[in-house]
Amino acid sequence: MDFGWSPEENGFRLQVRAFIREQLPADWDELALTEEESYQHGRRYAVALAGRKWRVMHWPVEFGGLGYNHWRHLIFSEEAAYHRFPGASDMGTGFVGPTLMLFGDERQKQRFLPAIADATVQFCQLFTEPGAGSDLGSLQTRAVRDGDDYVVTGQKIFTSGGHHADWGWLGARTNQEAPKHRGISTFLIDMKSPGVTVRPLINMTGQHIQNEVFFDEVRIPSENLVGEENRGWYQMASTLDFERARIGWFAGARRMLDDMVGFARTASQGGRVLGKRPEVRFRLADLAVALEVGRFLAYRTVWMLEHGDIPNKEASAAKAFSSETNQRLANFGVSMLGLYGTLQRDSKHALLRGRLEQMYKETVFYTVAAGSSEIQRNIIATRGLGLPR
């Protein structure tokens, strides 16, 4: 196995870095932006990427891509995450588009995939409910056929980007009598439809990223049903596999680790340079090894995609490992900084721009979002190791 990159791939990585340098200000600090500023920057950079067709470079040309292989897209995703470049990916490019290619009809593909590619349509994912998170098969939002429409009633929660989305990727129950995994269907829903209400959920960092979404007899044209009725569970599972197989989980953490190492080389505590304290060196080295392992877990999922397979247990392994490694990194980082590690970014005494304090709070939900670590281990056990349920 050759783990090296070809000259062409290395050249492409340099192109990506040059593009990022051209786009981002020299003093780029995304944490200094308001939520609205951050959103507007993300949209602007998404449009810039779309101009080069880089958002979906691995998609077929007819859907707005360049037909590149998945390895080039991985290189791009690594660099974008490491350099904290906004707008590189979203629900549409990362999850909805790839699933739509597998299960959507030709009309749906032609309508939505080019619009996702050129950043003119934003999607949110409408799966999780108050009583159906990790056990997603228990969702209760209903879609009842009425003539040429489905009438949707219910509630979703923790919908990332729902307040900005134009369209949603909805999972709803269409057969109340079927076993829970066999009575679900998936739909494309216009988020501006009458009866859709989006309410903000503010997280512990004070950010509005997620939302509650309510459906009060919302009518969806039957042509927006994706795939076969009552077969939506399998489509949702594929969407989640794409969501979990992301190199950005590790590349972003690697950037934070590099910042911590740079800080430890010069900063002192108690008259001694942090980087010369064995307990600090060992923990930093341990995290570096973990992130390298995680990188190759993510590479394995890309290798499968390149060979036409959908990563399942492999995506779960990468997701669980990345969630827990990010938490370990944030926990140790705050500890390494001592009491300064608890200062928020607006304090003049905050170290590393308060990034570790922010990361500490942000990563709390990592082992729950996109399927809890317990669910990931169940998938690895049953679908990977063949263990009984």
Image (cartoon, helix red, strand yellow):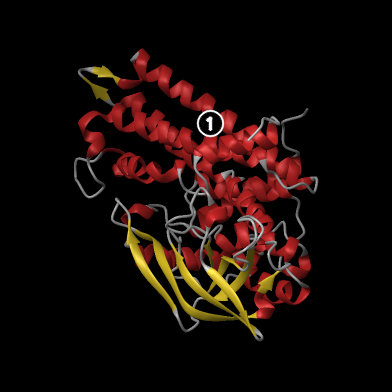
Q: Quick one: quadrant of the C terminus? A: top right
Q: Position of residue 235 (x, y in %)?
A: 67, 58
**Residue 312 at least partly seen:** yes
Image location (x, y in percent) of residue 62: 78, 69
The residue under label 1 is 291
Extreme-front residue of the structure: 177
Across and down, in percent, residue 44 comes to 49, 68
Q: Residue at x 67, y 51 (%)?
A: 73
On screen, residue 272 versus residue 137, left or right, reads: left
Q: Quadrant of the N terminus?
A: top right
**Side (left or right) of 308 relative to 185:** right
- Residue 182's image quarter? bottom right
Task: Count the labels in the image.
Answer: 1
Instruction: Say whether residue 121 is visible.
Output: no
- Relative horizontal placement of residue 96, taking residue 62 as reference (left or right): left
Furthest-bottom residue in view?
147
Which residue is drawn at the image coordinates 73% and 75% (left, top)? 110
Q: Residue at x 51, y 53 (%)?
A: 21
Residue type marked 1: Leu
Q: Secondary structure under badge 1?
A: helix
At horizontal 23% and vertical 38% (from top left) the residue drawn is 342
Q: Is residue 336 above or below residue 21?
A: above
Q: Is residue 236 above or below residue 36?
A: above
Residues 162 and 221: in front is: 221
In front of the other: 321 or 2? 321
